[in-house]
Amino acid sequence: MNSNSFLKLDYEQDEVVSAQRMRFLHSSRFKLLAILGVFGTIALSLQQAWLWQKEGALPVTWYTPIYLPLVFGGIFVAVYFFAPSVDFRVNSQWRNTFDLYLENNVFRITAIGKIQGIEKAWDKVKQVLENDKVYVMFFDSEQEFIIMPKRVLKEQAGFVQDKLTRKAKI
């Protein structure tokens, strides 16, 4: 790679949706949602079993342990299948074009026509998620991330892959 490379960075809906879904599946929110759903269902089932034993008949609220997994399942479906597409349509930043500046030690993303941008050192990348369309790079938290579509990297793909393979993949 040249010492400096400039690329145009733009996002396509399928790239953003793919990255956001990947982020959700690896996030603490997904784990929390799963844990709450499982424990809540177990607790309600135990409560209904206790009522059944106490009353000697099936309680009128026997169906409540069924509702909780349905509610949590509905939340999962909404967050996984619908939220990423809505985010792309609502968040105008995904439809902007940026300058992507790659160097050996840092990369910088700047909106076209703007002076300030985001500059990150490659060694500050804490975790990387990857699929066939994008890299998702995390920095200090789950909320501090950058999505880098593989499509825009072109001949710099090997350089970026080399920089990111040194990081632990989730």
Image (spheres, rainbow, N blue to C red):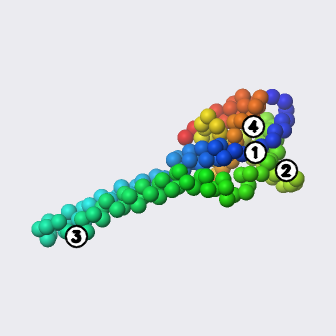
Three-letter residue code for mark 4: Val
Q: Residue tagged by mark 2?
A: 112
Query: Mark 1 Cα within 10 Å, few/some/many (few <14, many 20+)?
Result: some
Q: Residue tagged by mark 3?
A: 60
| Residue depicted at 52% across the width and 55% down the height | 79
Q: CA distance from mark 1 to mark 4?
A: 8 Å
Three-letter residue code for mark 1: Asp
First of labels 3, 2 by sequence position:
3
Q: Quadrant of the C terminus?
A: top right
Residue 66's disc number: none
Q: Residue tagged by mark 1?
A: 10
Q: Residue tagged by mark 4?
A: 152
Mark 1: which secondary structure? strand
Query: Mark 4 Cα within 10 Å, few/some/many (few <14, many 20+)?
Result: some
Q: CA distance from mark 1 to mark 2?
A: 11 Å
First of labels 3, 1 by sequence position:
1
Three-letter residue code for mark 2: Ile
